[in-house]
Image: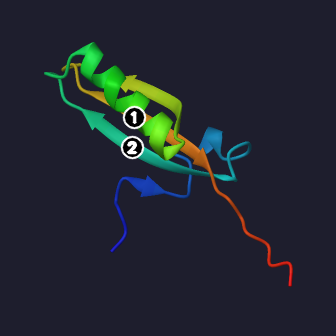
């Protein structure tokens, strides 16, 4: 089963032209998470999963949606 927070398509159509070689993960951070906890979570994703920050959206109630992206590695057979 695939992870619903991971997708190979960009979250918004305007990102499609320049982001064909990326996969995306969407994190939803609830209102109660402090900035230091969110920073720690994003740092762990960046350091161990090689994700980079693509977009952050703060909703009216304080919920944060974070789009992370990482380059898709294409392996070419040499033999």
Q: Residues within 10 Å of mark 1 (few under 14, many from 20)?
A: few
Image height of 64 relative to 26, above or below: above
* Disc sitting over residue 26 in the figure: 2
Image height of 6 relative to 61, above or below: below
Image height of 74 relative to 51, above or below: below
The image position of residue 64, as x and y in percent, is 30, 26
Q: Which of pointers 2 and 1 indicates the residue nearer the eye?
A: 1
Q: Mark 1 falls on what kind of element?
A: helix
Left/right placement of residue 3 relative to residue 79 reads left
Q: Mark 2 falls on what kind of element?
A: strand
Counting every numbered tag in the picture gives 2
Give the residue at x 55% y 58%.
8
Residue lying furthest left in this view?
32
Q: Is residue 12 visible?
A: no
Give the residue at x 49% y 35%.
46
Along the viewing direction, whichever of 24 and 40 lies nearer the viewer: 40
Q: Quadrant of residue 17?
A: top right
Q: Quadrant of residue 74?
A: bottom right
The image position of residue 57, as x and y in percent, is 39, 25
Disc 1 target residue:
44
* Contact flag, marks 2 and 1 (Cβ < 8 Å): no
Give the residue at x 18% y 20%.
61
Residue lying furthest top in this view?
35
Q: Residues within 10 Å of mark 2 (few under 14, many from 20)?
A: some
Left/right placement of residue 14 relative to residue 64 reads right
Left/right placement of residue 56 relative to residue 20 reads left
For marks 2 and 1, the one nearer the N-term is 2
Q: Is residue 11 visible?
A: yes
Residue lying furthest bottom in this view?
79
Left/right placement of residue 65 relative to residue 73 reads left
Along the viewing direction, whichever of 11 and 39 lies nearer the viewer: 39
Give the residue at x 86% y 85%.
79
């Amino acid at each position: 089963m695939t992870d619903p927070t991971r997708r190979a398509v960009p979250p918004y159509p305007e990102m499609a032209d320049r982001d064909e070689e990326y996969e995306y993960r969407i994190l939803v951070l609830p209102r109660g998470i402090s900035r230091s906890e969110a920073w720690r979570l994003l740092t762990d994703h960046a350091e161990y999963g090689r994700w980079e920050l693509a977009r952050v959206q703060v909703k009216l109630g304080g919920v944060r949606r974070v789009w992370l992206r990482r380059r898709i590695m294409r392996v070419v057979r040499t033999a």
